[in-house]
Amino acid sequence: MLALWLLINLVKDPTEFFSVAVIGLTNGSVYALIALGYTLVYGILQLINFAHGDVFSLGGLLSATVILDAFDLTAASSAVAIVIGVAVSLLIAVAFSSALNTTVELVGYRRLRNAPRLAPLITAVGMSFILQNVGLYFWGPNYTSTDNLIPNSAAFSIGGVDFQWDNLVVILLTMPLLLALTWLVTSTRQGKAMRATSQDPEAAAMMGINVNRTISFTFALAGGLAGAAGLLYVLQFTTIRFDQGFQLGLIAFTAAVLGGIGNLAGAVLGAVIIGLIEAFNEGLEWHAAGSDWTRSIVFGLLIAILVFRPEGLLGERTPEGA
Amino acid sequence: MSTTATDRGTDSGTVVLELNDVHTYYGAIHALKGVTLDVRAGEIVTLIGANGAGKSTTLRSINGLNHARKGAIRFSGRDITGAAPHSIVKMGIAQSPEGRRLFPRMSVYENLEMGAFQRKDRSNFKGDLDRVFQLFPRLAERRQQKAGTLSGGEQQMCAIGRALMARPKLLLLDEPSMGLAPIFVEKIFEIIVEINQQGTPVLLVEQNALMALDVANRGYVLETGRIALQGEAKDLRQNERVRQTYLGET
């Protein structure tokens, strides 16, 4: 039925269909970067890091501040200035969020490593509140807004479908990050240490792997991706607030569970699916439920997945049934 | 085959590993109540005892996963009592743990690679890999297979091979015969002797006391966290108490 609905929309107005799909992919890219952080950390500690969404919003807020105050960028700035400014804020956001996420682990979770599961989980919720309030303290309760730095004019069109600069930049920045992450996890020494630690931390220690350092590295990586997502979010939506991470974190977490938590490809797939569902639901003309229903549809899907395929789309069935 | 190496002089070897009055706890449980033992160069030393006597705890105290609360552990003359597990591996103690503990979703090759993780001399990696494949030709055939899909015997081979990839100065083996078909048990013990003859001292923890005492130079009998008996393996083999309790003879 869903396929039929999509097909009818496609036939009725193909141009609109594909334009909406591009928007879905863009949102999905940002969700994917955040979802990967949940899944990386879950993979290694079996912990849902509820503070992760807030690392994203602090990264986004900081990059907005860098864009506004350090570079004073507006829509009228020259292209060169914008490229340099954005690149520098990306680096700052990534570095800051990496350090922040690593600190959260060091302060909040490390001592609780052998405690009952519930203890670090509650700590993660607490960390989330702390980070939100840090955001509130430094950036205030209002939205921090930048100019629309990347023009939303069409970069090129194929058959009437416009590919806007802002969408394109987000997708083009996300792809290399995803490829680099895949390479890092599958082929490097550090990546193999991560996989070994996630499969059996004690055995990893017996191989001479420094488990604490590997976990710190994982948090740094997850934080870095969240920081990158924060900047991309600001570029695309031009506005961000201290509590933005709560909502986006929830969506990204849903994406990670949808794809199979602990599975990197799954997190990306889940994120793209959710991005597309949102965009189709809000953007298509013919009999779409509309934005009021988006959340219900996304979380309804989550419930359906948990009931019928609890290991997620790409997750492995484990003996624990998780 | 089960060749014993007992005729080689045991008192002449330099001490590689030394535990002196080691006390280890699991929370409030006093698991090791003063264990003193040593392993010397060239030896196979076995640690036998019933379930829960503290055999695995002794190994966990040595490899740093459960630090001893009292007493001292020295390796090649260095105090390693409170050292982190990864730095102990770096000093040259490698282990094939109880229950194999392979990385199930990594290939056989990757598991062996993890065994060599802390080594800096990547140039010898290929040679050591060949050595492991020579000891366990089966692993060479299955190098791309996920370790979790191997049979029990193959997993044990992979676990021992993985420990050898660290080029250890001391090899700890925890229950290498557990859960294996008799034919595999024979094979594994032959290989333990072969590894030892190539120059690596072995501390062997076993429930299969008969096989263990057959291949070992010396043995320790652990009972509720204490060393109850110790001596040459061939003497322990004849000991009345050992024969009744651990070898099932009357």
Image (spheres, grey):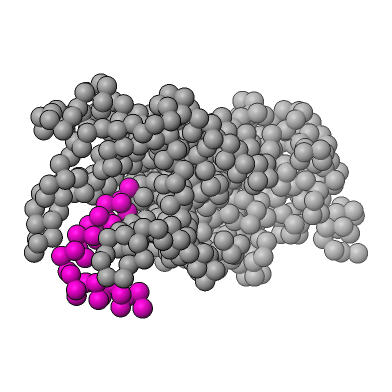
Residue drawn where x is 81% and y is 48% of the image: B53
**Position above or below: A104 against B215:** above
Residue drawn where x is 9% and y is 62% of the image: A160
Q: Quadrant of residue A191?
A: top left
**Position above or below: A100 against B199:** above
In the shown orientation, is residue A6 left or right of residue A308?
left
Residue A188 at x, y = what percent?
35, 44
Residue A256 at x, y = what percent?
44, 55
Q: Is residue A257 visible?
A: yes
Residue drawn where x is 85% and y is 47% of the image: B223
Given residues B134 and A181, the one toward you in this image is A181
Given residues A267 and B250, the one toward you in this image is A267
Residue A127 at x, y = what percent?
55, 35
Q: Main secondary structure of the magenta part?
A: helix
Does the magenta segment cover residue A123?
A: no
Does the magenta segment cover residue A29?
A: yes
Q: Is residue A194 visible?
A: no
Q: Quadrant of residue B159?
A: bottom right
- Identify the image quadrant of the N terminus of chain A: bottom left
Residue drawn where x is 66% and y is 60% of the image: B177
**Position above or below: A277 against A109:** below
Q: Which residues are magenta?
A: A1-30
Given residues A134 and B149, the one toward you in this image is A134
In the shown orientation, is residue A96 left or right of residue B80?
left
- Identify the image quadrant of the C terminus of chain A: bottom right
Residue B87 at x, y = what percent?
54, 32
